[in-house]
Amino acid sequence: MAILQLEDGTRLTDLREIYRELAPLNIKLNRWAVGNSQQLRQLLGQDSLNEDEKEQILKSLDRYFEQLQQTAGYQMRDLIVLHPGIPNLDALLTKFAKIHTHSEDEVRYIVDGEGIFGFVRPDGTQVELTVQPEEYINVPAGTEHWFYLTPAQRIKAVRYFTGTEGWTPEYTGTQIRTRQAVA
Ligand SMILES: [Fe+2]
């Protein structure tokens, strides 16, 4: 379940309260079931995955991609797999750990592990949202945000794209004031 942490340290787990706090950002947060396939569950439990295995996971979740294709013009999807065994994991993550925006929506479906999105709300306050398996999130283009992993350093997420452009982070220079305690 998603957890939202406010700047004063308040942690919200009630989805209605989380939606209310995120409302000024127009962020969409939904629960999407992974399903009961044993094979899929087994693949999701692995640390690393080869390209065939990634494609198997993506195919078994393509019902969501098809919805996005039809309703919102999405064209591509891939699976990002991060775990402590990945060489240069820290360097990879550094790119997204500073406050940035994109010219396209950032759309993720978490299927294993977890990660933390930080957001700057229109009034300047900052919040951090922990996203967990079976959670779909759409961060609108132009939203000031950052992303990092929890101490487990493990996540698998489907990424949906409308095109190849607009994916480069544009750094805004805003400083992160709230960052959840990491080990
Ligand atoms: Fe981003």
Image (cartoon, rainbow, N blue to C red):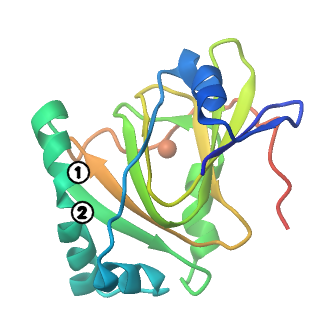
Question: Mark number for residue 78?
Answer: none
User: For this view, does 161 lie left or right of residue 124?
Assistant: left
Q: Secondary structure at mark 2?
A: loop
Find residue 106 and report its horizontal and vertical position in percent.
40, 41
Please report the residue visible at 57 percent of the width from the left and 29 percent of the height from the top. 144
User: For this view, does 183 lie left or right of residue 12?
Assistant: right
67 over 124 or under it: above or below? below
Find residue 177 and report its horizontal and vertical position in percent.
82, 35
**Kind of residue at badge 1:** Tyr
Q: Secondary structure at mark 1?
A: helix
152 over 129 or under it: above or below? below
Of 176 and 26, the residue lying toward us: 26
Q: How many marks?
A: 2
Please report the residue visible at 21 percent of the width from the left and 78 percent of the height from the top. 56
| Residue behind mark 1 | 64
| Residue behind mark 2 | 61
Residue labelled 2 has its Cβ within 8 Å of some atom of ligand 1: no
Find residue 132 and report its horizontal and vertical position in percent.
56, 57
**Kind of residue at badge 2:** Leu
Is the Cβ of the residue at disc 1 closer than 8 Å to that at disc 2? Answer: yes
Q: Residue furthest left?
A: 70
137 over 127 or under it: above or below? below
Q: State the separation of the CA atoms marked 1 and 2.
A: 6 Å
In the picture, residue 126 is in which quadrant?
top right
